[in-house]
Amino acid sequence: MAGPRAGGVRSMGVFFSRRKKQKAERNGGRLGLLALIAVALFAASASTFWLLDKEWRQVIEAADRLVDAFLEHEIFAVREIKVKGGEKLGGAEIVALAALKHGASVWKVDPVAAEKRVAAHPWVRRVLVRREFPRRVVIEVEEREAKAIAVLGALYYVDREGFVFKQVEPGDNMDFPLLTGLEPEDLAYPTSFATRQRIQEALRLNDLMGQDPLAVSEIHFLKQGGVTLYPMTYRLALQMGWGEWEEKLSRLERVLALWKGQEERLGVLDFRFRDQVVARVK
């Protein structure tokens, strides 16, 4: 009994094994067929897309040519470059700095790039470049105004905002008060902002001093703070301390009135003490 039953079990195992193999082969065939169909569909789609893409490329290229022809049309050729505000530099120099040319397409003028080129010049404080269609470009320039000359080894112009912006060259205007006592490192980060504020305030004092007889020849910045002024008319030092300029100048006027005709005897006037003036004679 055991032998035939065991043989039957083996026969059934072989049968099911063969069925699994046939099923796997059929499944494999189906997968292969599906893969072939997918490849065929992809190839057909790619061919169609390539044909459509080629047509679209032709359309886009034609559109590009049309746009180029429009942008390059002579109606948009720059005929006028107008400069507003250029005095120290002059219109021709500003146009050259901006790298703008007559005859170029106004569409291809890059205002931002032109502004950067012009703004690199030390005398230029602000610049605005704009296109006025169809054929004009306008450059508006605000130049810096020198208010003093800083002595920093070499001589440099300083504007009202306290910016040291240009080295003084031979032949340049020297008719400005000198700023002494500053060091190059004072103008570097992180002290540059505070230094500019001090320069601005000192220049405000200079404006309050006015012209003759109190016009200032030199403003000396002290390390411990404060400034000393040296007038053009009187050979004396005015130790002003810091701040409260109007009140101190009022005291100065009273002292000069008392010493009228004897100003040459005065060596130093010290205004650093509230409501007082300490005078030292020569």
Image (cartoon, rainbow, N blue to C red):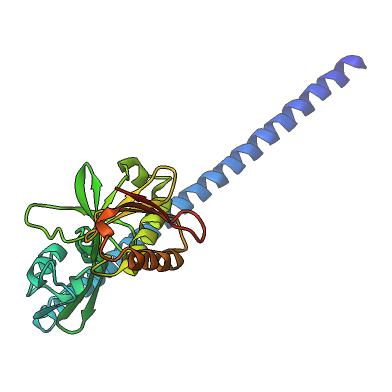
**Picture residue at 10% right of the left edge, 58% below the top:** 172
Query: Looking at this view, is 151 or 137 the one in front?
Result: 151
- Where in the figure is residue 264, as x and y percent of width and height? 24, 56
- Where in the figure is residue 232, as x and y percent of width and height? 22, 59
Q: Is residue 56 above or below residue 277?
A: below
Left or right? Give the position of 41 relative to 237.
right
Q: Is residue 152 above or below residue 248?
A: above
Q: How many marks?
A: 0
State the residue lying farthest toward the top: 3
- Where in the figure is residue 121, as x and y percent of width and height? 19, 59
Query: Looking at this view, is 29 or 160 the one in front?
Result: 160
Left or right? Give the position of 103 relative to 66.
left
**Picture residue at 56% right of the left edge, 45% below the top:** 31
Left or right? Give the position of 40 relative to 144.
right
- Where in the figure is residue 272, as x and y percent of width and height? 46, 53
Query: Looking at this view, is 258 or 183 the one in front?
Result: 258
Quarter of the N terminus within the rendering: top right
Q: Is residue 39 above or below residue 207?
A: above
Where residue 62 sits, quadrant-wise, is bottom left
Q: Is residue 69 visible?
A: yes
Where residue 161 sits, quadrant-wise, is bottom left
**Picture residue at 9% right of the left edge, 70% below the top:** 101
Q: Is residue 218 visible?
A: no
